[in-house]
Image (cartoon, helix red, strand yellow):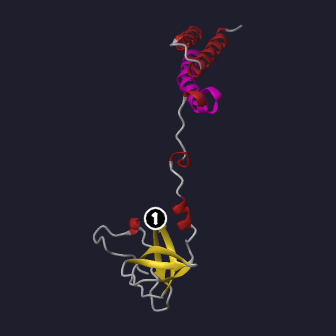
C-alpha cells in the first residue's frame, strides 16, 4: 500500500480518536493518541513528498476542528450527553401556575362597562364580574362601554368604545424619538 494512503488512514484515525475523546472522557489518553496519529500522518505525508505533506497538513488543519465541532454539536442529542449536560428549564417548569393571570388573559378583546369614573384607573364590569382596570389614554365616565385591549401582568388595560373617543394605536417604545420621550407616533 502507498505511504500516502497510510497517512490518510492515520489522519482519519486521529479524527476518530478526537471524536471519541469528546464522548468518552479518558483523561486525555485518546486526545494524546489523536495528536500522535495526526502528527504521524503529516510526517508520513512529507516523507512521500512536499505536495502530499501539504495536502495532509491542510486536511489535518481543516478536518480536526471540523470533526471536534461536529462531535460537540451532536453530543447534547445523545443519551449520554443529555445526562452530562444541564438543559435550560422551560418557563412552564419554573414559573408558578397563576390562575388569576390566565383568567385575565381570557378577557382580552371583550367588552364591558365602566362601573366607576376612570381618570386613570377604576372598576369595570364584564359579564357581571367586577375587574379593576386602567384606562389606556383618556378619562372614562361611569356607564361608558370599554374594550379590553391589553393585559400587562395583573393589570387590565381598557379603551373607550364611543365614537367621540379617539382610537390610538398601541405605542411601540422602540419607535419613540430620543429627543422627546413623550413624543407619540401619529395616529
**Nearest the eye: 152 or 75:** 152
In the picture as drawn, the residue positioned furthest to the bottom comes out as 164
Q: Quadrant of the N terminus?
A: top right
Q: Which stretch is magenta?
A: 52-81
39 on left or right of 1: left
Query: Is 80 colored magenta in this rendering?
Result: yes
Q: In the displayed structure, would residue 35 be above or below residue 105?
A: above
Q: Residue at x 40, y 84 (%)?
A: 117
Residue 169 seen in the figure: no
Q: Quadrant of the C terminus?
A: bottom left
Quadrant in which residue 136 is drawn: bottom left
Q: Which residue is mark 1?
A: 154
Disc 1, SS: loop
Q: In the displayed structure, would residue 106 be above or below residue 57?
A: below
Q: Residue at x 52, y 62 (%)?
A: 100
Q: Residue 63 in the image: state x and y as whole percent.
A: 58, 24
63 on left or right of 171: right
Q: Residue 92 in the image: state x and y as whole percent.
A: 56, 49
**Nearest the eye: 174 or 145:** 145
Amino acid at each position: 500500500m502507498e505511504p500516502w494512503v497510510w497517512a490518510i488512514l492515520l489522519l482519519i484515525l486521529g479524527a476518530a480518536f478526537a471524536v471519541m475523546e469528546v464522548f468518552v472522557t479518558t483523561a486525555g489518553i485518546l486526545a494524546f493518541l489523536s495528536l500522535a496519529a495526526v502528527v504521524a500522518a503529516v510526517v508520513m505525508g512529507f516523507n512521500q513528498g512536499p505536495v502530499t505533506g501539504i495536502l495532509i497538513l491542510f486536511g489535518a488543519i481543516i478536518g480536526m476542528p471540523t470533526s471536534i465541532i461536529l462531535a460537540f454539536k451532536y453530543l447534547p442529542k445523545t443519551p449520554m450527553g443529555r445526562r452530562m449536560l444541564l438543559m435550560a428549564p422551560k418557563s412552564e417548569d419554573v414559573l408558578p401556575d397563576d390562575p388569576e393571570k390566565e383568567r385575565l388573559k381570557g378577557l382580552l378583546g371583550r367588552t364591558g362597562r365602566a362601573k366607576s369614573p376612570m381618570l386613570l384607573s377604576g372598576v369595570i364590569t364584564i359579564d357581571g364580574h367586577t375587574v379593576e382596570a386602567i384606562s389606556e389614554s383618556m378619562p372614562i365616565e361611569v356607564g361608558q362601554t370599554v374594550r379590553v385591549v391589553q393585559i400587562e401582568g395583573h393589570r387590565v388595560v381598557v379603551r373607550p368604545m364611543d365614537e367621540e373617543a379617539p382610537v390610538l394605536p398601541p405605542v411601540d417604545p422602540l419607535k419613540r424619538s430620543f429627543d422627546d420621550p413623550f413624543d407619540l407616533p401619529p395616529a
